[in-house]
Image: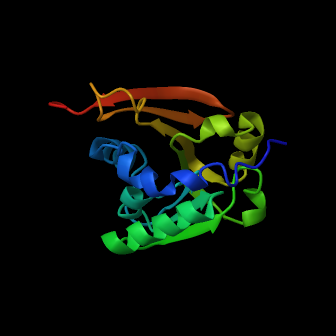
């Protein structure tokens, strides 16, 4: 069992939402098209932090279950969601080690930004296999390195399906960025 990441990011909360690069709108358009997101789906954002993936996804699906081990990150996410008028978000304290005990229920997608490397990947993918609906996937999205100022709006997207196989990988870059 991996150690709990609880408390690891407590001191970063005031800076996280302010300085962490945002995901480009193209990422959400790609997810919407690839998975026919029409406002009826449920999505799990594991390692949600302050909601960089959660808030934009909330506009595309019925519900986002945002899970993070840091209570202060969840509080910041709730604050930002209220400020943005974003609804349909269920903020939950937890991590990959407690995921099944959270009774998340079935989801079409599980999205993770910079959190997959903190997990016991094999066990997590096995656990997610019990939650993800047919036709769903695990989506690993990164914003690129924070020091990569030359391409701040780039992203990598990996879709994991079929027992940990990564059949699709897109590298997106917004024109003019």
Does residue 166 lie above or below 6 as drawn?
above
Which x, y percent locates residue 156? Answer: 42, 30
- Which one is in front, 26 or 96? 96
Does residue 161 lie above or below 109 as drawn?
above
Which x, y percent locates residue 35? Answer: 43, 48
From the viewer's perspective, tell me whether residue 14 is left or right of residue 124.
Answer: left
From the viewer's perspective, tell me whether residue 35 is left or right of residue 4.
Answer: left
Q: Residue 177: tell me if it is visible.
A: yes
Residue 27 quadrant: top left
Which x, y percent locates residue 122? Answer: 75, 34
Q: Quadrant of the N terminus?
A: top right
Residue found at x 50% / y 42%: 113
Residue 115 quadrant: top right
Q: Residue furthest left?
A: 176
Q: Quadrant of the C terminus?
A: top left
Q: Residue furthest right?
A: 1
From the viewer's perspective, tell me whether residue 102 is left or right of residue 84.
Answer: right
From the viewer's perspective, tell me whether residue 157 is left or right of residue 11.
Answer: left
Residue found at x 57% / y 28%: 166
- Which one is in front, 38 or 147? 147
Q: Residue furthest front?
A: 11
Which x, y percent locates residue 15? Answer: 43, 52
Residue found at x 40% / y 33%: 146
Q: How many numbered discs? A: 0
């Amino acid at each position: 069992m991996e150690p709990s990441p609880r408390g690891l990011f407590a001191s970063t909360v005031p800076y996280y939402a302010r300085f962490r690069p945002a995901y480009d709108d193209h990422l959400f358009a790609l997810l919407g098209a690839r998975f026919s997101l029409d406002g009826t789906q449920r999505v799990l954002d594991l390692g949600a932090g302050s909601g960089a993936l959660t808030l934009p996804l909330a506009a595309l699906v019925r519900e986002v279950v945002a899970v993070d081990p840091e209570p202060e990150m969840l509080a910041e996410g709730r604050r930002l969601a209220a400020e943005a008028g974003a609804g349909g978000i269920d903020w939950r304290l937890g991590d990959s080690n407690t995921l099944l005990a959270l009774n998340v229920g079935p989801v079409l997608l599980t999205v993770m930004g910079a959190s997959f490397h903190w997990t016991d990947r094999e066990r997590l993918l096995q656990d997610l296999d019990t939650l993800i609906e047919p036709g769903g996937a695990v989506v690993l999205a990164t914003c690129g390195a924070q020091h990569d100022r030359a391409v701040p709006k780039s992203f990598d997207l990996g879709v994991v399906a079929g027992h940990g196989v990564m059949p699709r990988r897109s590298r997106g870059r917004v024109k003019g960025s």
